[in-house]
Image: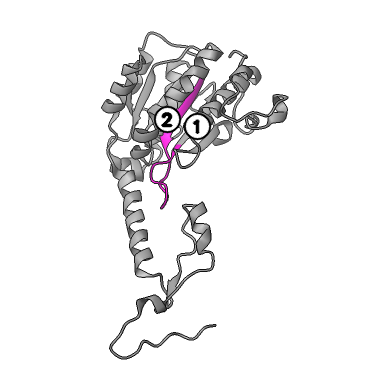
Amino acid sequence: MSKPVQPPAGKFPVGNIIHHNPWQGLREFTAARIALGRAGSSLPTDELLKFGLAHAQARDAVHQPFDSESLAQQLEADGMTTITVHSAAQTRETYLCRPDLGRRLGDDSRRALTAYPDKQADILLVIGDGLSSKAVHRQAVPFIRALSPYLSLLGLKMAPVVLAHQSRVALGDDIGACLRARAVAILIGERPGLSSPDSLGIYFTWEPHTRRLESERNCISNIRPEGLDYPQAAFKLAWLLEQAGQRRLSGIELKDESDNPALYGLVKPLFNPPERLTGKL
């Protein structure tokens, strides 16, 4: 163990008291907090300040209000119909303290969806704020634009996009049951990390109803430009849609093998195999 450097009288050589980590060169390959170095038994001040900023950004992502009106305008400009609903959690504070209320619809929203005339679509997309509305503001619309050509290729009837306030993952199943959709995919803000406050997750369920278990859903996570990009994520969901329609199931019994070239008899990038999508729900 190296001996601590004693600064000469009247000087404070900062560069000498910071011990750099030998993994420093690996930091260019990941956003993970590695090779931070140390100053004595603690972090260098610069890294400590960066940690504080990342923590504040993660907290802000949790509490940022969900701007469903802006998302509705963008989707309607693309020719889609939208419906806005609320979970049984009326406030953000209630949502964070009562996860169970975020998993079911509020009474007014349930009545509105039950009375909706055009039901029994093949696929329902729900956009829920979850634990990061920043994620859905940034990622949801670009993802849906990447997914739309696959839905057309599969010949699927799409329900109106539902925008859900104070939502947990299971709320998608409740909404899907009300609209009698054959499959539902909820696009939801994931729990913010210290390097990813805007990560989008997708949870897919075949034949949604309120008694579905977590094991009966498929998850696609970390959707953002720095993680799983939109074309790749869109193809994964399209592949799950096709396979769920053929096998009539989702969850742990439906393994995501969309990136296995042996299934196609050819080697192609994950985001460019549209000729494979020939099945129907």
Asked which secondary structure carries label 2, the reply is helix
Q: Which mark is residue 171?
A: 2
Provide residue 131's location: percent of width, then percent of height: 38, 41
Provide residue 181's location: percent of width, then percent of height: 48, 17
Task: Write down the quadrant of residue 115 in the picture.
Answer: top left
Q: Residue at x 43, y 76 (%)?
A: 41
Provide residue 96's location: percent of width, then percent of height: 35, 44
**In this picture, which residue range is highlighted in magenta?**
182-200
Q: Nearer the viewer, residue 268 or 135?
A: 268
Q: Is residue 2 magenta?
A: no
* Above or below 62: residue 137: above
Circle 2 or circle 1, nearest the eye: 1
Q: CA distance from mark 2 to mark 1?
A: 11 Å
* Above or below 194: residue 189: above
- Identity, as a three-letter code, of the amino acid under mark 2: Leu
Q: Residue at x 49, y 17 (%)?
A: 149
Q: Is residue 31 left or right of residue 71?
A: right
